[in-house]
Image (cartoon, rainbow, N blue to C red):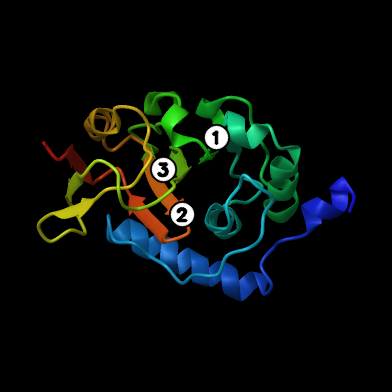
Amino acid sequence: MDFEALAMEGGFARPVLEAQSAFRALMDALARPGTSMAGFPVPGPPAPLSPEAGAVALALCDPDTPIWLDAAMREENAVAAWLGFHTGAPIVAHAAEAHFAFVADPGDLIGLENFAQGSQDYPDRSATLVLQVASLEGGPALRLAGPGIETERAIAPRPLPRHFARQWEQNNARFPRGIDVLLVCREGLIGLPRTVRIHQQEG
């Protein structure tokens, strides 16, 4: 199969219905931070872009939402070609220019402050980071609080960016500016909007 044909493969089987279903799951995840959402349709993008991250792209990205890819994603040209064909979104070289960032290696991610933070007048002009984690369990325990969480909620995804809890505290301090994060893996997805507070569990 030639490169162009490969880029055309692997979209949603029923693009409109499946994109709507994935979009609802994403919105639910952001409205209920820390709650794992599963069972939404996934496409078949080229590795290392995962099916769950591909679903995010097909549900949220379009020609007006520039995409940044981490080094692991950039090494495989088919990823950028697939995203371009199925979403029309341009791929940008600089993190600060992107509306969405797709990250195959969260443990080696650049600092969160390098991504678009929005402005006081237009906080929605910030970036959403899509982090492909190995699992939603087994990592350092994090305690979540804030809107959409009745008291507290605990999660333990792995791997996460270095010093993630500290970086997130700085992200909170920039509110209403700041980034949002989606954690995706085969188990489902978790939304971390900028409004949520995150503390690493001691011990």
On screen, 189 above or below 138?
below
Q: Secondary structure at mark 3?
A: helix
- Residue carrying label 1: 98
Q: How many other residues sit within 10 Å of disc 3, few (<14), some (14-19) or many (≥20)?
A: some
- Residue carrying label 3: 124
Instruction: Please state if 57 lies on the left or on the right of 154 as rendered.
Output: right
- In the rendered image, residue 177, in percent from the top left (x then y), is placed at 33, 35
- In the rendered image, residue 170, in percent from the top left (x then y), is placed at 25, 28
On screen, 95 above or below 159?
above
Q: Secondary structure at mark 1?
A: loop
State the CA–CA distance, disc 1 to disc 2: 22 Å
Question: In which quadrant of the rendered view does residue 173 lie?
Answer: top left
Which tag, 1 or 3, sits closer to the chain's start?
1
Numbered disc in front, either 1 or 3: 1
Instruction: Please state if 5 lies on the left or on the right of 165 as rendered.
Output: right
Picture disc at residue 185: 2
Q: Nearer the viewer, residue 147 or 139?
A: 139
The residue drawn where x is 78% and y is 51% is 7
Determine contact: label 1, label 3, CB under 8 Å. Answer: no
Q: Secondary structure at mark 2?
A: strand
Question: Which quadrant is home to the C terminus?
Answer: top left
State the CA–CA distance, disc 2 to disc 3: 25 Å
Q: How many marks?
A: 3
Q: Which amino acid type is marked by label 3?
A: Asp
Numbered disc in front, either 1 or 2: 2
The residue drawn where x is 43% and y is 46% is 133
- In the rendered image, residue 157, in percent from the top left (x then y), is placed at 33, 47
